[in-house]
Amino acid sequence: MGPTASGKTALALDWAERFGGEIVSVDSALVYRGLEIGAAKPDAAERARVPHHMLDLREPWQTYSAAEFAADARAAVDAILARGRLPILAGGTGLYFAALLEGLSPMPAADPGTRAGIAAEAEARGWPALHADLAEIDPDAAARIKPGDPQRIQRALEVYRLSGVTISEWQRRAPETPAFPAEVLALAIAPDDRAVLHQRIAARFDAMLAAGFLDEVRALRAMPALRAHSAPLDLPAIRAVGYRQAWEYLDGQGDADAFRERAIAATRQLAKRQMTWLRGRGADVRWFDPTGQSGALADIVGRFID
């Protein structure tokens, strides 16, 4: 686990080759086809080195829930173990890790009809108005969810309309999940110095720009399903860090320098949220600086596998 740009991918590849492993991506952006450069998706050479799972599962105009991820990733882990190989979970999406390893509260599954109705209401009244509705029925959820987060507003309203029970109450109930089929060594990979992480984030984004990130977003914008979508910026794929800022820039918002600064700032905010989630894991997670503690990191992984 770790914040974006912390070096998880390189370590996972190294360990997979050293210990006979396969990588299970735990990243909410990598499940979408067409999100390559900006999502730092493993390239063809990396996939040729080591088998990867949980990539390219949905089109960018589709949605994918944490519950779906947990079921699909569990199947991938079971298959890897059945082959006698080592599953290596690598990514930065905390909700996906929690869903897979600990399970989710048994709340109602997504219902396309209810979601369509909520989306139509949002089109007519606006998401802030629906957020106000949520505040009346579930103040706790409304306090956690920002008025500009349509995906989570929609889910909270959907759960309540389907069950008559608020999403906050569902989340307080004990999760239902089968026991994870293997022992887990949870490692957080992050530089001790936040300035180092910020430098890595900026350098990686500049490398993405040089590799053609904006052309990638132009290709997404040209897809008929996305061109026809009434609110593409509300889609989980397009809301991914970097993609939203690039989309807005190509819509004419600001110049190239302002776009770069906004994208880097958004990536830093993502890293901050990821670090906060990781710190909340407590003693279950062991922290390592990938640059200064590489020897200790390799030692603990080797001893765990032995």
Image (spheres, rainbow, N blue to C red):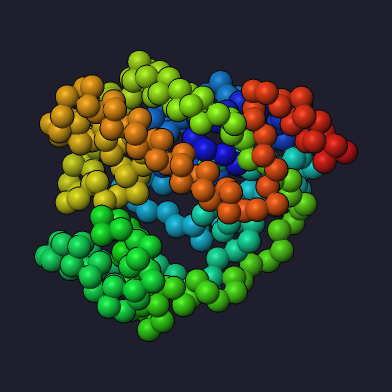
Q: Residue at 42%, 41% (x, y): give it.
A: 270
Residue shown at 42%/54% (left/top)?
A: 64
The residue at 29%/72% (across/down) is 134
Picture quadrant of residue 70: bottom right
User: Which corner quadrant holds the C terminus?
Assistant: top right
Q: Quick one: 265 or 127, which is closer to the camera?
A: 265
Residue that extends furthest to the top in the rendered view of this protein:
210
Picture quadrant of residue 19: top right
Q: 202 left or right of 71?
A: left
**In which quarter of the view is residue 13 placed?**
top right
Above or below, comparing residue 144 to residue 272 in the picture: below
On the rendered structure, is 288 left or right of 25? right
Q: Residue 43 location in percent, x, y? A: 50, 25
Q: How many labels does the image show?
A: 0
Residue at the outermost bottom position:
164
In the rendered image, residue 75, in percent from the top left (x then y), is placed at 63, 53
- Which residue occupies the extreme right position in the image? 306
**Which residue lies at the image location 39% right of the left edge and 40% below the top edge?**
269
Residue 6 visible within the image: yes
Residue 275 vertical placement versus 4 (above, below): below
Q: Is residue 305 left or right of residue 60?
A: right
**Residue 50 at what x, y percent from top left?**
65, 29
The picture places residue 112, in percent across and down from the top left corner, at 33, 67
| In the image, residue 190 above or below residue 92 | above
Q: Observer-nearest residue: 279 or 24?
A: 279
Look at the image and tell me in which quarter the N terminus lies: top right
Q: 248 or 190: nearer the eye?
A: 190
- Residue 111 in view (yes/no): no
